[in-house]
Image: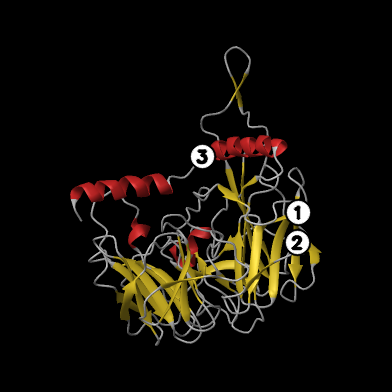
Amino acid sequence: MREPQFDRVRSEVAAAVRQPEFSTVRQRAGRVRRRRAATTSGVFLVSVLAAASFGYTAQNTPPDYGSLDPVPVATCTQDCSWPWMTASAGTGAEVYGVVSRCEECDSELFVSPDGAGSWEARTVPPAPGEVRTPRVVSLAAPGPGLLVWREQGSPAGGVTGTQGTGGPAADPTAPSSIMQTWISRDGGRTWARPTATTTPADAVPAGSRPVDCDLVELPACVVGVLDPGSGRFTPLAVQPTGITVEPGWTSETSVPVGDRLWVPGLDPATRKPAVATSSDAGRTWRTHVFTDGAPLPADSGLPAARFAPNVAAGAGGTAYAVTSRADGTLVSHYTTDGGTTWQTGQAVERARALPGYVAADGSHIVATDVGASAARGTGHYTSITLSGMPEGAIRKVEITSEQAGKPYLMASGSETYLSADGRTWQQIRVP
């Protein structure tokens, strides 16, 4: 890469992934409220916190579990009137949604057992100190009945010391924000704080997703499990080898729930894009390095995630991985055998830094800066229109189950969408 181009890319990526302070997000929230008071169409503050399969990324960068996602403001694309569904997650036919009735209303949690056909109210966990309304929540459903709720707030009162004049002063050693995680094993009826054990699990439980070990800072662990019986986080007994995986990368894929696991990363020796795959729920692993991908330059200041592959998988062993070459071109790779062998596909023009997803017909659909493009196998990517999906609304797509009637779930700002095939979408009506 030419030096001027490298400097430009480094500057753009660094600016795109810089995490805002929580106080900055609160100030933005105030500006949002003032703007909404003067207009009927508004902008929603949707600072989504990251967790396993949580939220969205910007500029090919996975979330930082200690801070807020670098996309703090999202515009509603269709009906901007309240109520809003500000977070959602799904597993099998179950869909969970965090709902706010008005801008100053507290958040509510609902679950649908039948793919958003009917809804039941659930409880919400306590807030971490002072939080704004609607509550800024990250929600994940790693398995049937399992929920992970993550939320960031500021310490209550925010005053911990006094100045020499007798006035209040903040303690410089006090945390400026609080990240809090809650676990539910009964679909949101009751909540408990998470616990962890170093006793390893043999495999990811059937019908569940793996979780990122950074959620509870398990040492020497990349891929973990939330045990459905105990509610404890535990590492997999066999971890991927021959690959460097940073916190957050385990969940930055769009793959169906099943025995096949996909973990993006970098080759430790060449620092080129790589992917670790398992066909037996994590009991054994194999790693593939995309040798035509651009390596992460040493001491470049660029985030490593910019060079990791964007991975999307479908039924069976079909998957796509998009990597960046040294000249900045994004190229697709295609496998039909679960990642044992890969074929190099075509360039993906104007693609946004999201993993895309594999539709029911086997095509790879990616978000671009002008809408969406799709290709099948190693074919060319062409522009498409997704019925029911507003342009610019596409975010990371979660595939809840191969057996669900509408397995494709996507949250975008204040809106959540479901699809049976990944081509035709329907917005969920808030309960």
- Badge 2: how crowded within 10 Å, few (<14), some, or many (20+)? some
Q: Please tell me whether mark 1 sits on a helix, a strand or a loop.
A: loop
Label 2, on which residue?
Answer: 430
Residue 420, horizontal then vertical, whole percent:
63, 79
Asked which colour scheme the image uses, the reply is secondary structure
How many circles with numbers are drawn on the protein?
3
Closer-to-camera residue (307/202):
307
Q: Which mark is residue 376?
A: none
**Disc on the earlier residue, 3 or 2:** 3
Query: Pointers 2 and 1 in contact (CB under 8 A)?
Result: yes
Residues at marks 1 and 3, CA–CA distance in whole angstroms: 27 Å
- Residue type at mark 2 is Val
**Disc on the earlier residue, 2 or 1:** 1
Q: For the residues carrying marks 1 and 3, which lies nearer the camera in this image?
A: 1
- Badge 1: how crowded within 10 Å, few (<14), some, or many (20+)? some
Residues at marks 3 and 2, CA–CA distance in whole angstroms: 31 Å
Residue 297, horizontal then vertical, whole percent:
24, 56
Label 1, on which residue?
Answer: 83
Query: Pointers 1 and 3 in contact (CB under 8 A)?
Result: no
Farthest-out residue, top: 165
The vertical placement of 34 against 104, above or below, is above
Residues at marks 2 and 1, CA–CA distance in whole angstroms: 7 Å
What's the residue at 64%, 67% (across, down)? 417
Tell me if 54 is positioned left or right of 184 in this view. Answer: left
- Badge 3: how crowded within 10 Å, few (<14), some, or many (20+)? few
Q: Which mark is residue 21?
A: 3
Residue 377, horizontal then vertical, whole percent:
39, 82
Q: For the residues carrying marks 3 and 2, which lies nearer the camera in this image?
A: 2
